[in-house]
Image: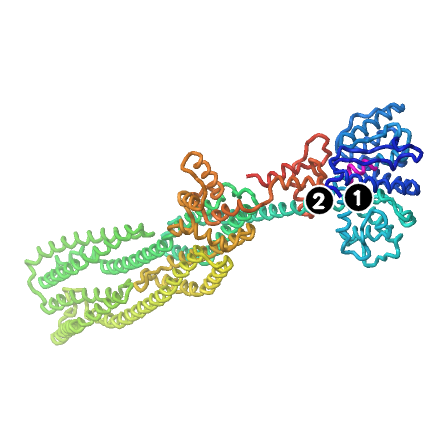
Amino acid sequence: MAHNRYSAHSLDYNTYSNPDQSKGDKMMYQGNGNNGPNNYDEYMQQEEEWEREGLLDPAWEKQQRKTFTAWCNSHLRKAGTQIDNIEEDFQNGLKLMLLLEILSGEQLPKPDRGKMRFHKIANVNKALDFIASKGVRLVSIGAEEIVDGNVKMTLGMIWTIILRFAIQDISVDEMTAKDGLLLWCQRKTAPYKNVNVQNFHISWKDGLAFCALIHRHRPDLIDYNKLSKANPLQNLNLAFDIAEKYLDIPRMLDAEEIVANERPDERSIITYVSSYYHHFTHAQEAESAAQRIGRALKGRQGNEDLENEYDRLASDLLGWIQRTTPWLENRTTDNTLPGVRKKLDEFRTYRTQHKPPRVSQKGELETAFNTLQTKLRLQNRPPYMPKEGRMVSDIANAWKNLENAERGFEDWLLSEMMRLERLDRLAQKFKRKADIHEEWSKGKEELLSRNDYRNATLSEVRALKRKHEAFESDLAVHQERVEQIAAIAEELNKLGYHDSPAINQRCQRICSHWDRIGSLTVQRRQGIDEVEKVLERVDTLHLDFAKRVSPFNNWLDGAREDLVDMFIVHTIEATQGLINDHETFKTTLVEADKEFRTLLGLFQEVQRFAQQHNIPGAMENPYTNMTAQEVTNKWNEVRQLVPRRDQALQQEMMKQQQNERIRRQFAEKANVVGPWIEKQLDIVASIGMGVHKSLEDALGKLRACRTAVEAFRPHIDELEQYHQAEQEAIILENKYTKYTMETLRVGWEQLLTSINRNINEVENQILTRDSKGITSEQLNEYRLSFNHFDKNRTGRLTPEEFKACLLSLGHNVRNDKQGETLFRKIMSQVDPNMTGYVKFESFLDYFTRQATETDSADQLIESFRVLAQDRPYIMPDDLRRELPPDQAEYCIRKMQPFHGPGAPPQALDYGSFARTLYQF
């Protein structure tokens, strides 16, 4: 058969001529076709044979009448009308013109509404003129035959319309029209038993060909294996019923007539079979269009979910950072030791419980953002721009501010705690010295205010004088203690002790009292000197005791004070120095014991002399208030304090030895963990920047690294325990390692972040590779090119490096104004967020994007047009019929109303919707 047989019609309508007419009077249907004469003559010969058989058997007229009527009604019902009698209902030309408008989608001239014959002829002529305008030339047929109800002419005209609007546009491979329709039927029914379609008459008599066509496209409607060639009537009725009920194809044929006729009418079967062709091909187009739209909508819905998840994570993380940063920046306390310890406990809880989940959340946020941007690039969508203040850079800056605030916070707390401990010890020392001084000074003013020397004997006066001299010596010794009390108070004020007002008040009271004692001492000395000239007798023995007992008593007081004094040391060496000093002190106890025995001997000698000579009042020493019993008590107290001091120093030595073990324990573990973290960082960096056999190989190595890191986590937890032990022991320095817990924490967090970021980048590269269809060799070539210009191995290129890489790969980026414009356009694609550098993912996406084909807005609009049956708008029922429920409702919710002329209510604008999905 010739190519494009029906692209221009050239058919003779002898079939519909009256048998009594001459051949020259027969109606002719001709076209201005370009087919060769051989093909045309062959087709015409077949047509004439069919017509002669039709003249011999009038059953053709009955079959065509029913088929053509049903075919016309299948289109007229779209306008809410139908015909009942084909030769009568077209006589006035109105429904004929309506039929042509429905078939062509064009508007015919306005019909005449009159009922006169000439009105009807004018309408039919308008219809025939429209047919002629479509390249069809009707010969020997006029409007009068149609108006007069000529059945054969009317059927011939309808067949012409069927050929032009239902058969002509059928194309399968290089076959068109009838031959294309026959080839389509043969291909669709080839796999079916007992079906051999060779023509459009006897090949369809048993009904199996109709059933096979339905089963091929809708196997759910017919169980073909249960059909039998021996039941043609049942097969035909089954096919016609199912086509009418489920495929919306009206029953155009009568099963009994097809079975009864030896050769069924070919044109009736062609007309009916063409309805199958148009229904199934439109269904395939609609399914393809629905799939395309489904892909686009599924991607959009998934991207919206990722955008919402990113926004939720960003809001939550930023909120936590904004709440936490001011707390870390607040470097004030209530100036009490319990308050600082509470704040230190809160900081440890923050480091171990609150911050680690947020570190993971930050990694998840970066992963979600990178995955979303990769999917958007692969789907040819514009990059996602988070809300203002929630960009990745905003989160990174907020996190940096958090870490800056956190840096040094723990050291500040520890130093503050040491300062407050020192203040507490100084306050205790002040209280102890003040208690001793106040105990010593109690009653001194009253004693110095007495005038007892005025009525005393010479010996009494001398005794009072010497007693006063001893007091002056004692006063000089106590001067140092008063100065120490003042110095401690001044230091407490400088260090900001919380109870400084009470300290200052007590210090002022002591100093004022000391000044009064000094004045009274001078006054009493002057009074005794005046009386001394009269009094000469001196009790030598009491005087000797008094002279000896005063310095010894001071030594005892100093020794007692030193033995009970608190000490603050942080090293074994400092503790050993205290032990050595104490051992040196113990060597002085021998001489002190001799002095004690001498004083005791003096007292015993006075006692023996008083008993021997019976001297009243001889046991009262006029030169000192100290008694032998008091000296004995103080000496015994010193002897008891010495072993206690030994025990305290030994306990402190044990504590410092324990601290040394803690230092070594932490250092030993840190010296293992630190190099391991550094090695893992180098391994991850080499995997991320290296060239691999495949991306899956790189991904496997990174996941192995992550597994190893997760398995190594107990070492970090163990190190945290050692570090907590150091803090509890207030160990601030460790000479056995260069690593601190802070540097190890930072390294650990960097390692976790680096592994997760590299895994995410490799997964995105796999997604890009699979979507773009590039090979591992091509991917490695891109990686080598990128690494060559990434001199510093930062994983990103500066604009200058990227431009040099473009030139090396053959891109013509000239150093002129046009070249700069082109380069800025390229940079806007690979760096849409204007970060000032190009990552490998963007680099790879740019070099692979141009080599692949992705859906476009025009393709999506064309798909919607298929579902909308060529209308510029689409109805909600169309979307619900062709798309999955969730995607249909998504479209209905997102599409804007269509406001074009003639648009029904609820019409939706699919054009603007499709363009927004691909709008940059």
Which residue is depicted at the point 85% across and 35% down?
Answer: 13
Circle 2 Cα neighbour tier, 10 Å, few/some/many (<14 / 14–19 / ≥20): few
Which residue is depicted at the point 25% across and 71% down?
Answer: 642
The x, y position of residue 803, in whole percent, is 42, 43
Measured Cα–Cα span from mark 2 to mark 1? 21 Å
Q: Nearer the viewer, residue 49 or 337?
A: 49
The x, y position of residue 306, in whole percent, is 56, 48
The x, y position of residue 629, in whole percent, is 21, 71
Res 103 → quadrant: top right
Secondary-structure class at tag 2: loop
Name the mark on residue 174.
Answer: 2
The x, y position of residue 195, in whole percent, is 81, 54
**Is residue 249 shown in magenta?**
no
| Type of the residue with mark 2 | Glu
Residue named by callout 1: 275
Q: Which residues are magenta?
A: 159-167
| Type of the residue with mark 1 | Ser
Residue farthest along the front direction in this orientation:
38
Q: Nearer the viewer, residue 758 or 395?
A: 758
Res 719 → quadrant: bottom left
Secondary-structure class at tag 1: helix
In the rendered image, the quadrant that contains the C terminus is top right
Name the mark on residue 213.
Answer: none
Q: Main secondary structure of the magenta part?
A: helix
Q: How many marks?
A: 2
Q: Nearer the viewer, residue 307 or 185?
A: 185
Residue 98 vertical position relative to residue 493 in the rendered view, above or below: above
Image position of 769 (left or right of 610): right
